Amino acid sequence: MIIMDREINSSVLLESQSIKGFVFQNRYVCPPFDIAAATDDGLITEELLSIYKQRKGPSLIVVEQAAISPTGQYRERLIYADRDECLEGLSKLANVIHQNNQVAVVQINHAGSAADSSFTGMEVVAPSAVINPGFKRTLPRALTITEIHEIRDAFVQAAIRVKKAGFDGVEIHNCHGFLLTQFLSPLTNLRIDKYGGSLENRSRLLFEIVRDVRKAVGEEFLLLVRLGVDDLLPGGLTLEEGCLISKKLEEAGIDILDISSGLMAPLTLKGPAMLRNHIKEVKKQVSIPVIGTGALENIEIASDMVEKGEVDFIGIGRKILKQPNYVEGLLEIINRAK
C-alpha cells in the first residue's frame, strides 16, 4: 500500500502482542461504545450476548461502560457492576468474548454531572456545582469528601466484580465529560480542598482509584485507563497536562493507556484520524501500549501510525456498532494485500 508516496506495511496491523501473558492476536480493538441493551436495572441480556458474539476480529474487546453506582448512570439500559447480582450475566459475557479468542475487559464509570436524574430518580452530583458543558443537564450538587471516598471505593468494588466474573482486565473511564473527567478539568472542578486547584489535586481521585484498584485485583490483572487528554475547550484541560497525567499513570502501574478527548467528545474535531496528533504526543511520553481512536478506519493511516510507533492499537467503535464484523472485513483486506 502507498501513502504519501511512501510504501507502508499494512501487515503490521496483523502483528500479535503479549501483555502480562495475554496474547493480542492483532492491533485492532473494539473500544467501549454504548449499546444500551441491558435490562432496566443494568443486567446482561441475551441481546447483549448476541451482539458481542458477533464482534469477531478485534484482539481486544472493551465492554461498554458499567456503572459503579445507580447515581452514576447517564442513560437507560446500560450495564451495571454495582452489586453481586451482576456477576452471573457478566460471567456469560466474558465467556462469549473468550470464545472468540479475544482479550476481555470491562470499562467502569460514574457519570457525575452527566447523569440523568429523570430516570435515576437520584440527586446529580459532581466535583462542583457546575453545569456539564458536554451534556448540559441538571445543575449538580458538589460532592463531600466522604462521598468522594465512597465513589472511590465503589470503583474498587466494581473492579473486583469484573475480575470475579472472569474478565482479563478493567478500564477506568476518565474521558468524554464523565465524573473523573469533571475532576480533572479546571472548567468543572472549582474545589479548594485537596481534590481541586492544582493538576495534582484535580487528578488525585483518579490516582487513588488506580492505586486501590491495582491493590485489589493484583498485578496479573490488566488495568487500563481511558484518558481524555484534552478538553477541546478554552480554559479546559490541555494536551500538555494530559501528557503529564499519562506519564504519571504509567508510573502508577497501569498496563495500557486508551486515549480520547476530555469534556467534549472527539467528534468536536473533524476528519479521518482526528486525534492523531494527541495520540502521537502521548505516545512520546510513555512506553506502555497505547490505544488510539477517532476515525481510524482507513487501513493506510492506521498502518502508518503503528509502523511509525505513534500508537500500538487501533480502536474502531462506530463502524463496529453498525457492522459487528467490520474488523473481520478489514483483516481480510490486509491479508489479501500481503
Image (spheres, grey):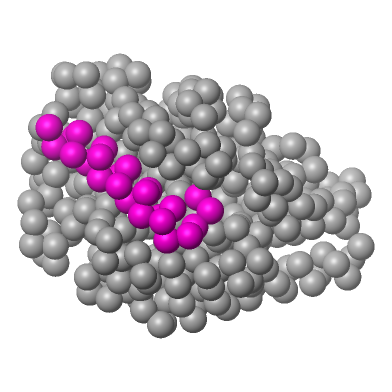
The quadrant the C terminus occupies is bottom right
Whether residue 158 is in magenta: the answer is yes
Residue 75: percent from left, percent from top: 25, 64
Snapshot quadrant of residue 207: top left
Residue 322: percent from left, percent from top: 52, 75
- Residue 158 falls left or right of residue 57: left
Whether residue 45 is in magenta: the answer is no
Q: Residue at x 25, y 40 (%)?
A: 153
Closer to the camera in the image, 137 or 171: 171
Which contiguous range is marked in magenta? 146-169
Residue 233: percent from left, percent from top: 36, 36
Please tell me whether the stretch drawn in magenta is mainly helix, strand or loop.
helix
The quadrant the N terminus occupies is bottom right
Snapshot quadrant of residue 331: bottom right
Compared with 310, 244 (above or below) is above
Residue 51: percent from left, percent from top: 49, 78
- Residue 109 falls left or right of residue 309: left
Q: Residue at x 63, y 63 (%)?
A: 102
Closer to the camera in the image, 85 or 134: 85
